[in-house]
Image: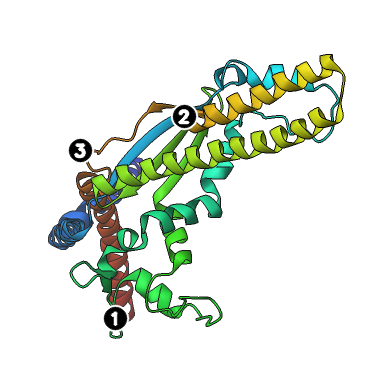
Amino acid sequence: MRGACYKHMDDENTFSHNRGQTNIFLPWRIIKKRRKFISIFVSAVVVLTVMMSLFLTDIYEARTIIMPVTPNETGGGISSSFMQQVGGMTGIAVPESASSAEIVTLLKSIGLREAIITKHNLLPVLFPDEWDKKAKTWRINEGFTLDPSLIARKLRPVDKKIPGHDGNVPAIWDGLRELDKTVAVISNTKEKTITISVESYDPVVAAQIAGYFLSALNEYMSGEAKRVAMINRKYLEEQLLQTADPYIKQKLYNMIAQQLETSMMAEVKENFAFKILDRPKVPDKKIKPKRALMVMLSLVASLLLSVFLVFFLEYLEKVKTQKIE
């Protein structure tokens, strides 16, 4: 009797052990069972990814790095000496060197970017697919299109009060939005540098636009310095006519000379308010799309998804079998 009981317990242990082994190897059995589906699914996704990546446009990036100059670098300490001589005089605008934050704000400003687009006629460059180079005119596409920019432009409401805003051709606001997507301004507070990076389908265009930003920034800041110097000079000359004290006159003459020096430095110095540490160069390699990475990610993602699908299909098949029974 006791021997029969032991035999029954041994049979139960053996059954439990075999059932555990079956549960352990069940996922691999399911994967092996549906390996054909997994291989077809993964292959299809990878091939589709390769085909799509071949149709993507290569994007190049051009960079330039600048650094704001210190007051001592803007003409021999003109700002500091001028401030000492001015003292508490009212009506004088003291010239100051621009900080990194001010330069970054200026580079991101609508006014500067609009001036760049207008001066260099960048709308045909920013929207090359819509510009007919031979006819020197815009292509007006009234039919069906898959271009996201054209679709977005057609969906936007047309305001007839805005000059040139008819919805069919790119306007200045479209150019500003395109620059927001292609131009990045990054400030490194630790190294006190500012990086301007431009992405474009054409490496030459990317370098040119980066250069346009540098020239526009230099023109604006030197022009602003000359404007302030002219205002100060006019005020000092008025004060010179109103005083008879020779000592004060001498100080005024010195300050007028400093304003003239500031104006001349802003006129002749290439980079009056900032130094160019790294000029924009035409890139020789694209930065995206990274086709190899896309294929690897699609391989891993499709493999995981296919495994999930085979388990889900197996579950549906089991449920269907149970209903039939």
Is residue 16 in view? no
Residue nearest the observer in this picture, 56 or 52: 56
Residue nearest the observer in this picture, 14 or 195: 195
Q: Which residue is mark 3?
A: 284
Is 309 above or below relative to 213? below
Q: Which residue is mark 1?
A: 141
Coordinates of residue 254 in the picture (x, y in percent): 70, 18
Local secondary structure at mark 1: loop
Residue at image point 47% right, 27% down: 269
Q: Earlier in the sequence, mark 3 or mark 1?
A: 1
How far apart are the alpha carbons under marks 3 and 2?
33 Å
Side of 248 relative to 60 (left or right): right
Q: Which residue is mark 2?
A: 268
**Quarter the C terminus occupies:** bottom left
Density class for disc 3 (Cα within 10 Å; few <14, some 14-19, many ≥20) is: few
Residue 83 sits in quarter = top right
Q: Amino acid at mark 3?
A: Asp
What is the number of callouts on the image?
A: 3
Residue at image point 59% right, 36% down: 226
How far apart are the alpha carbons under marks 3 and 1?
34 Å
Q: Amino acid at mark 2?
A: Val
Q: Amino acid at mark 1?
A: Asn
